[in-house]
DNA sequence: AACGCCGCTTTTTTT
DNA sequence: AAGCGGCGTT
């Protein structure tokens, strides 16, 4: 380790590194060298204080951040860093839960349900109780359950506490508690935990098993929490318990960058921390090393509008830097074009690489127009987040088989695969099996094994075949390594063949994705660092991976596109914050749910402070939202920036384009959705076999042929309802028929 | 049981 | 724009 590493730190940074004993809170402003401090702090513990790496627990916000930090520490102290306990709350505590699972009545190979699994389980439950699925939407229900779990409210407490019932009744959803209870029960029966359970159950484990708590209290002599402002109560209590004996707890955060309240994060944790540890050391890092004076100034002018904050003053010694460019576009597509050409020019003039640019947006759906523009300009880009690899259908299908082969209680996996590919086991049969299992108080797998007694002939034999197949997969998974098992399952489940036979472009893509999955598993198996090469172990590895953790591209020179949320902790030379429009950013949801806009403003603050050299912002006058063109107002946040930092009316003027002209017709005209007028029914001009091919217009009086009714005449065409549906009257030998479906009508 | 068509909903952010 | 449920047809 370098002798003089302390010298490159400023006094508060140095203090933060050296103050290793006792409770410490580091309030680290944006760009204040927080990561460097954390790295050196751990290196200092290892090297100077001879602390065993096994006794340091460092909790980060993403697995990627953990990986990078481990890497940096390794550079400072060598291979010792490998043994540090480092990762997200979810990954560290799922590891602990696995080794202590039996104490909670779980097997150590328990499945982790992702939010898709959770939502579909909730959907099943709502249906099972015959509740109104318009009222009990999976998203809403899951949020309610999730926030209860994050506040450590069990279903027992939830159903016993009249306050929750009153609240739910007021919202017209009195059955929430019942759903919560059933949800927990079904997860447990499926040997599954959802994301929140990983934290909730860790709390239960530490509450009910003092010996276990004690073991970890002794083990973790030093506990560190990064991004503390984004921890929830459940997470806070875990760290509090772990550090209760040694009291060497160090939290690092910035209340100005708290952007995950929607997920249960509670800034109150920062205030509680002071109460819980009266002897607390507070260290403030206020000097920003990252950004120009302009950028720091703009950020401060935004965050200054917030009422709820711990006062601190972030300042910088860096240059003034250039003003913020404000780009104004006619449509979202033009916004993309302008951003792409700004990147192109900046690359030429200032010799930047693609990797020096990031484009940040509020919602994932905004990436589309940007992608297209970048592609047109031959600028390489990469999207972080969005629909991750592991969420794709074909991948989830394969993993569904794998999951079920590892855990036969995994109901969600079973539902996914039992009739994929089609093998003649329909929804009705599955429902019968589930009911039978529930009635006999048996698990689903037992019901499947007894399909002959439960179902009729054809379906039963299909299920029997399925059971035989899974049994053989079960053996494969137990005997072979993850790669061999996955290849075997992909082939013998029939999934691979189905994809191979699909010769469409998407089909080919899906096939390639599966190959990529298999390659990934091969890599996992070949990696000397993975000790357990079984399928079960691979599943555990990937359950908590996010798209952001995935960065094995050989060529790293690309423009990064992502949401502001996923940009947390990163920095780029040049940053574009796009879609600066009212209702979009700040989000309409936040405005209409009459919450204050402080979190949105903090989000804006995070976006601005990612930039080192130059900041661009853009908005469009019209944008497609929900498939409709809407006119937009510039975001109120643009008004809030100190005008001294803004370069208004940028050098780019909006070029015209067909889309732009189309949009301009509606500007100032309407804020209502624009719908293309439907004057005439459009039908498919058929080929010989009535398969739709081309389109042409159908008119009243046309002689037509209908596949069922034969030859006749169209006597009336009416466009009805808000959705402009065509009602066609078909007449044959004086007899009239109203046709609602006319895709196969043939004009003669 | 599978397929095809229609129409409704959805998107705020993520471990 | 796209995915999903519903419903009618094959």
Image: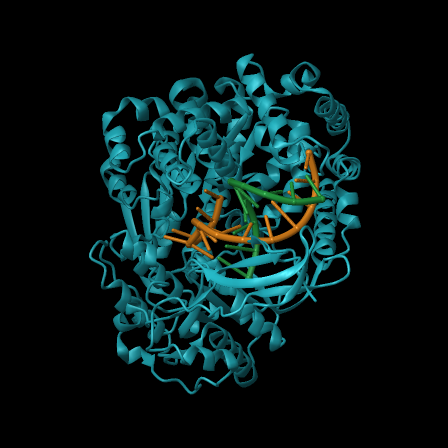
Chain colours: A cyan, B orange, C green
Q: Residue at x 73, y 20 (%)?
A: A457
* Relative image position of residue A521 (x, y in whole percent): 71, 43
* Relative image position of residue A234 (x, y in whole percent): 36, 34
The quarter of the image holding the C terminus of chain A is bottom right
Q: Residue at x 64, y 24 (%)?
A: A408
Relative to A698, residue A645 above or below: below
Quadrant housing residue A698: bottom right
How many numbered marks have been drawn onto this rendered protein structure? 0
Is residue A85 something one can see in this rendering?
no
Relative to A210, residue A271 above or below: below
Residue occupying the far top of the picture: A440
Viewer-proximal residue among A445 and A38? A445
* Relative image position of residue A730 (x, y in whole percent): 59, 57
Is residue A525 something one can see in this rendering?
yes
Relative to B6, residue A204 above or below: above
Viewer-proximal residue among A193 and A442? A442
Q: Residue at x 65, y 65 (%)?
A: A703
Q: Residue at x 56, y 63 (%)?
A: A715
Quadrant housing residue A373: bottom right
Residue occupying the far front of the picture: A734
* Relative image position of residue A190 (x, y in whole percent): 55, 25
Q: Is residue A53 left or right of residue A447?
A: left
Quadrant housing residue A428: top right
């Amino acid at each position: 380790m370098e002798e003089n590493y302390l010298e490159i730190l400023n006094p508060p940074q140095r203090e933060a590194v050296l103050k290793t004993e006792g409770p410490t809170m580091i309030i680290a402003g944006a760009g204040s060298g927080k990561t460097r401090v954390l790295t050196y702090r751990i290196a200092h513990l290892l090297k100077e204080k001879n602390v065993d790496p096994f006794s340091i627990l460092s909790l980060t916000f993403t697995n990627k951040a953990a990986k990078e930090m481990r890497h940096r520490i390794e550079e400072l102290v060598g291979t010792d860093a490998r043994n540090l306990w480092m990762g997200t709350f979810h990954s560290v505590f799922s590891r602990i839960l696995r080794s202590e699972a039996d104490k909670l009545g779980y097997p150590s190979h328990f499945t982790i349900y992702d939010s898709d699994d959770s939502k579909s389980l909730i959907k099943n439950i709502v249906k099972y109780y015959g509740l109104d699925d318009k009222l009990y939407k999976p998203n809403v229900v899951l949020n309610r359950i999730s926030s209860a779990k994050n506040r450590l409210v069990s279903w027992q407490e939830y159903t016993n506490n009249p306050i929750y019932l009153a609240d739910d009744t007021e919202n017209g959803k009195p059955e929430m508690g019942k759903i919560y209870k059933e949800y927990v029960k079904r997860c447990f029966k499926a040997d599954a935990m959802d994301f929140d359970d990983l934290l909730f159950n860790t709390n239960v484990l530490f509450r009910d098993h003092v010996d276990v708590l004690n073991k970890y209290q002794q083990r973790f002599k030093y506990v560190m929490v990064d991004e503390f402002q984004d921890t929830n109560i459940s997470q806070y209590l875990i760290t509090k318990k772990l550090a209760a004996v040694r009291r060497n707890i160090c939290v690092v955060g910035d209340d100005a960058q708290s952007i995950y309240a929607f997920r249960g994060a509670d800034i109150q944790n920062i205030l509680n921390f002071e109460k819980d540890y009266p002897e607390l050391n507070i260290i403030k890092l206020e000097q920003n090393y990252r950004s120009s004076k302009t950028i720091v100034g703009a950020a401060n002018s935004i965050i200054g509008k917030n009422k709820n904050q711990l006062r601190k003053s972030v300042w910088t010694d860096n240059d003034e830097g250039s003003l913020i460019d404000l780009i104004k576009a006619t449509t979202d597509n033009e916004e993309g074009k302008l951003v792409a050409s700004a990147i192109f020019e900046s690359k030429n003039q200032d010799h930047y690489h693609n990797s020096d640019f990031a484009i940040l947006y509020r919602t994932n759906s905004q990436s589309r127009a940007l992608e297209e523009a970048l592609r047109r300009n031959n600028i390489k880009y990469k999207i972080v987040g969005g629909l991750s690899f592991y969420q794709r259908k074909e991948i989830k299908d394969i993993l569904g088989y794998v999951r079920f082969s590892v855990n036969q209680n995994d109901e969600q996996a079973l539902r996914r695969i039992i009739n994929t590919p089609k093998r003649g086991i329909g929804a009705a049969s599955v429902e019968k099996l589930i009911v039978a299992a529930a009635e006999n108080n048996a698990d689903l797998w037992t019901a499947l094994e007894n399909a002959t007694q439960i179902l009729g002939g054809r379906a039963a034999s299909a299920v029997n075949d399925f059971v035989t197949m899974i049994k053989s997969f079960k053996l494969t998974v137990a005997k072979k390594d993850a790669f061999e098992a996955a290849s075997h399952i992909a082939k013998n489940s029939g999934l691979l063949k189905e994809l191979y036979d699909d010769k469409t472009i998407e089909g080919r893509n899906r096939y390639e994705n599966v190959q990529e999955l298999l390659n990934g598993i091969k890599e996992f198996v070949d990696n000397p660092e993975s000790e357990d090469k079984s399928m079960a172990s691979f599943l555990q590895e990937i359950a908590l991976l996010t798209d952001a953790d995935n960065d094995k591209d050989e060529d790293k020179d690309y423009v990064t596109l992502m949401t502001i949320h996923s940009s947390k902790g990163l920095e780029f030379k040049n940053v574009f914050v796009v879609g600066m429009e009212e209702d979009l950013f700040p989000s309409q949801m936040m405005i209409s749910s009459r919450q204050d806009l402080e979190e949105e403003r903090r989000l804006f603050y995070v976006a601005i402070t990612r930039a080192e050299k130059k900041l661009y912002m853009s908005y469009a006058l019209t944008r497609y939202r929900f498939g409709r063109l809407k006119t937009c107002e510039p975001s109120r946040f643009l008004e809030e920036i100190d005008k001294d930092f803004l370069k208004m009316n940028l050098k780019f003027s909006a070029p015209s384009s067909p889309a732009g002209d189309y949009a301009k017709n509606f500007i100032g005209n309407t804020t209502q959705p624009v719908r293309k007028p439907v004057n005439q029914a459009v039908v498919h001009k058929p080929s010989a076999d009535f398969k739709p091919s081309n389109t042409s217009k159908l008119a009243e009086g046309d002689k037509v042929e209908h596949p069922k009714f034969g030859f006749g005449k169209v006597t009336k065409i009416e466009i009805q309802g808000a959705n402009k549906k065509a009602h066609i009257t078909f007449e044959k030998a004086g007899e009239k028929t109203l046709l609602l479906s006319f895709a196969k009508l043939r004009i003669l």
